[in-house]
Image: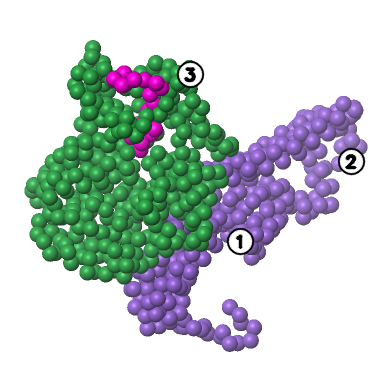
Chain colours: A purple, B green
Amino acid sequence: MELSEIGNLVNDLSGSSLIQILFILLAGWLLLIVDQKFFTWMASRFAGRLRLYILAVVPTLRLVIIASMTIMIITRIIDPTLQNIATLIGALFVVLGFAFRDYISSLMAGITTLFEMPYRHGDWISVEGYYGEVQSIGMRSVRVLTLEDSLVSIPHLKLWTEAMSNANNGTPDLQCQTDFFLASGHDPVNARNLFHDVALTSPYINLKKPLLVTVQELPWATRYRIKAYPLDPRRQSMFISDLVVRGKTELNRQGIAAASGWPGQNEPGNFA
Amino acid sequence: MKTDTPDSPPLWAFIPLTEYSPPAEPVTQAVRKGFSALFKRFRETKSGESKDGNMSLSVLDPEERMQVADDPDWKAGAEALDGEIEAWRGREGRSDSVFFLTGAPFSGYQEILDVWRKEKRVRLIEPPERKAILDSDKGWLKQFKKGKGLWVLPRLEHCFIRHTRGLGLVRSFLEEACNGAYGEGVIGCSGWSWSFLQHVWRGSHLPVYTQHPVDYRLLAELLWNIASASRSPETSNSLKFLQADGEPVLHYSSTEKSVQAGEFILKLASYSRGNIGVALEIWRNALKKEENLSEGESEIIYVSDWDSLSLPLLPSPTGDNEGFVLHALMIHGTLSYDLLDCLLPLSRSGISETCFLLEKARLLRKEGACWMISPPAYPVVRTYLKENDYLLDPF
């Protein structure tokens, strides 16, 4: 395609058209900010499913705003025939694709997230060792607030190449696992019942969801794993802390010993 | 609104819990409540302004208030309960040995059970001491085997603590009682505790009974019965409950020969979810009289406009601490500082601060050394706990 052909597609841009395009960009930018801030603020006033439903509006509305902006701008630059649009988009992709390969890839992945929804606002995801709650989904990256209160920005590009886990997948139900390792010589039935009651009596637990205690014999200990759901996924670390504190208190009171070591603990560099 | 329709159920009736459904809420009231709840999330709500117009009204003094809005006569309820229990005892082929009565806090089931026990002189089982609960001391269970005949344990919620060590005793008790080891008995338990205990103990299927839901018709009948109880039949029919603008709230129509209820009663029944104790408390606070009225002229009692009632609201923002305290109190009924400290993962000062904040918001009330939910706050607390996914009662 000759550059002159592409040049012929473009209308003569008058001053008023340029002002209109600038106005569309400015209005779109403002709307995107309002979309992000307003619905996030509104969601913070609610809990549970309603909070997630409100957060789900953000990316959908963003897609609508961006699509509307693109259409409005294109119709001001070229005659919006099918042939003209196809030619222009093709040319743009060739030029921009080379210049901003990674950036474009992230943008494309960002658009893909709107349809595939591998993560949504309020989801708890783990990507490349970063685990946290999705705070915002931008065009290029997703922002995750970790349990250590750090805000991590992860490019959508990672969606193509990295494994990603989503703990609650658009619902307020997030299972927490809390492990206790006990030395041999204890009564396993009593221990399992004890951990069941530890979870049952936690004020953080969501009793509408299943509560399970699994037991596994390891070469160096018996592992008891409490699988339960907190009332609010944002309280997961508090929930686990509460289970650990009250579990250990009861173990100490009953004189049940925790496993004291694990294979290879004294090997250099093993701090597990 | 006429209150006695041919299909009206009796005021005092008990039904299996599986048949219970809360009284239906009028659509307009539901929409109004929904919008009101939504707006409350985004702004501080001011308490209602008085719409008493030009009339100078004053609140009733406690004596006057009790004359027209005293506690109901629980004896009628106790008779209905007795009928249900006797029917259960006489049922052929019955395999269960325990009659289980549950209800919402303040709904009156406990008072009815107490009156029934005294009338029938049924053996009372007191709840165990806190130490016995925490130590799972089986000594408390021995008293069930001592005597023969029917026994009643009216407060099962006082027989356990939501603590790692606080569930063993109630588990043993329910296991034995439901297996028939203690003979025939009646257990009373709040709906909140029962919801929790179903996660603690999953034994045999129990016949669980509860009061029939009280809709606006039954509530109007109850309020009218209470108001007219202290008057002679001639004077009681001239009693009228009106709003300041003359709108009738509750009165007896001699032409219709029935009690007529206004919009206020409809709203009261809906707001209180048919809970007698909650409705009565709000009703008492809404009653007013004309100032400077001489004796003998009190044929008209004024009722505040519904929108001007100052009903308790949750403090904004409401966080985990408030939720934990409120839910613990719902499950246990009443709790002291010591017990709250034992149950919740909060500091003692945090518990103290939270309790006083909730007391200031009129959500909690102190009874001796213990905290409890205040009856008018019960609906708003229940709604909050529901919205935040806490385990609820079946009512």
Would you say the residues marked 2 and 1 are in contact, meaning their CB atoms lie under 8 Å apart?
no
Q: Which residue corresponds to mark 1? A: A147
Residue extending furthest toward the top? B255
Q: Nearer the viewer, residue B340 or B65?
A: B65
Cα distance, mark 3 to mark 2?
83 Å
Callouts 3 and 2 on one subunit: no
> In terms of image quadrants, where is residue A45?
top right
Cα distance, mark 3 to mark 1?
56 Å
Above/below status of B214 relative to A268: above
Q: What amino acid type is highlighted by mark number 2? A: Glu
B296 in magenta: yes
Sequence order check, earlier mark of 2 and 1: 2
Q: Which residue corresponds to mark 2? A: A2
Chain designation of label 1: A
Callouts 2 and 1 on one subunit: yes
Dot in front, 3 or 1: 3
Residue B147 appears left or right of B334 = left
How far across and how far down the image is residue B18, in percent? 26, 43
Task: Specify whether residue A12 is in view.
Answer: yes
Would you say the residues marked 3 and 1 are in contact, meaning their CB atoms lie under 8 Å apart?
no
Q: Quadrant of the C terminus of chain B?
A: top left
